[in-house]
Amino acid sequence: MTLPGREAYKDELTALAALDPRIVCLEADLGGPSHPFAERFPERFLNLGIAEAAAVDIAVGLASAGLRPFLSTFAAFGTWRAAESVKLGLGYQQAPVVLVCPYGGVSGGWFGPTHHSLEDLAVVQSLPGVRIAVPCGEAETRAVIQAAADEDRPCYVRLARNEPYEAPFEPAGRGEVGWVSGTGGPTLLVSVGEKPAQLCVAATERRPDLSHAHLCWVDFESLSQAAAELADHARRIVVVEEHRAAGSVASTLALLLPRHEVHSVNAGPSWPSEGGSHDETLAALGLTVPAVLAAAGAGETPAGASVLGASRPARPHDPLTRPAGAPAGRPTPSMANPGATLSPTT
């Protein structure tokens, strides 16, 4: 049976700790009644409670002593509540701390905006030298944890919550593009994360002419390596991600590929004010299959997408120019309209 990402993380880290005595596991009270790492290595497990900034500082201190700390907390708290500690410890000091954060995007669903994390990639992307991974499914999550444990670098790993995902593709390593379906055609869908991957798979089932690529490692260094391969396969790239437009993977690819047309299907600018499941919250934000298909349409900018790149050669310092004639879009859907498509967020 496939494990959810956060359970695969616990299991894989416990297995790695048996081989590497440097590995220590820190939790912000997310371990539940039984944590496999705590049960097997209680002397190397710390539950630090709801004190994320202090937890990051403690992890940095342990790293400076030669240990390999993995710290897990909610994505919203690890990147915002502990932002200064993450900046100084993982960014400035380059401490080899691995920050593993479930509840990425709106996977918390019913927990609401305080526990949603639609800005975390933008926060961490702004810190040079910190690697970022958004794995899909058990196999890729295990591969990411292995890579993070092997390298002496700070790393941010974004996971979902409790829903397992059977990924229909092989894990993609750093700088690699994982090809899900097709390798040709004028439009390429690029998914980041599990729910966006599901949306893209559904979109390609309706439109077999569309290609679908998947990215796991999305820090600037990794995207710089992957961008050339993406660029060789299509001029029109549609990035689907559970994140806001600002600081998104789409915005980074637009900077890296100024002569390509980069579209973004993202979570938009609204704040969900009502509870709902993960899928219901995504639909309310406009992350739907119709939005993906609309963004993949040829010709003018579809009403359900943002254009972050240029459909003509862009000036060297103006990679975010909107093509002439692109429509301004329409209002963002509310929670009462879960079937609506995505509004532009430029």
Image (cartoon, helix red, strand yellow):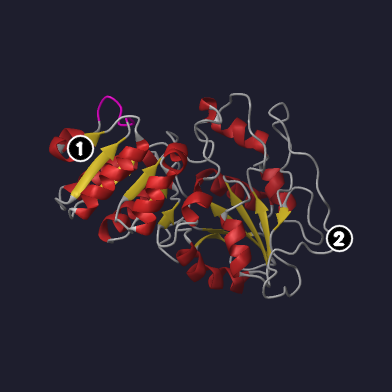
Counting residues from the start of the chain, the first of labels 2 and 1 encountered is 1
Decide whether residue 31 is among the magenta residues.
yes
What's the residue at 72%, 73% (across, down)? 314
CA distance for labels 2 and 1: 57 Å
Task: Classify mark 2: residues with Cα within 10 Å, few (<14), some (14-19) or many (20+).
Answer: few
Can you give x and y, in whole percent of width and height, for residue 291 in the image?
A: 71, 46
Question: The N terminus lies in which quarter of the figure?
Answer: top left
Going by the image, does 48 lie left or right of 205? Answer: left
Which structural element holds mark 2? loop
What's the residue at 63%, 47% (across, down)? 266
Task: Classify mark 1: residues with Cα within 10 Å, few (<14), some (14-19) or many (20+).
Answer: some
Going by the image, does 224 lie left or right of 147? Answer: right
Q: Is residue 176 visible to the viewer in this orientation of the structure?
A: no
What's the residue at 73%, 41% (across, down)? 341
Label at residue 330? none
On the image, which quarter does residue 337 sit in?
top right
The region drawn magenta spans 29-34
Can you give x and y, in whole percent of width and height, for residue 226 in the image?
A: 50, 68
Under mark 1, the amino acid is Phe
Instruction: Provide the residue designation for mark 1.
Output: 45
Compared with residue 271, is residue 143 higher up or lower down, i.e. above or below? Answer: below
Which structural element holds mark 1? strand
Q: Main secondary structure of the magenta part?
A: loop
Under mark 2, the amino acid is Gly
Q: Is residue 136 visible to the viewer in this orientation of the structure?
A: yes
Residue farthest to the right, as pictured? 325
Decide whether residue 223 is among the magenta residues.
no
Can you give x and y, in whole percent of width and height, for residue 174 in the image?
A: 41, 63
Compared with residue 4, is residue 239 higher up or lower down, i.e. above or below? Answer: below
Instruction: Provide the residue designation for mark 2.
Output: 325
Can you give x and y, in whole percent of width and height, for residue 228 in the image?
A: 55, 73
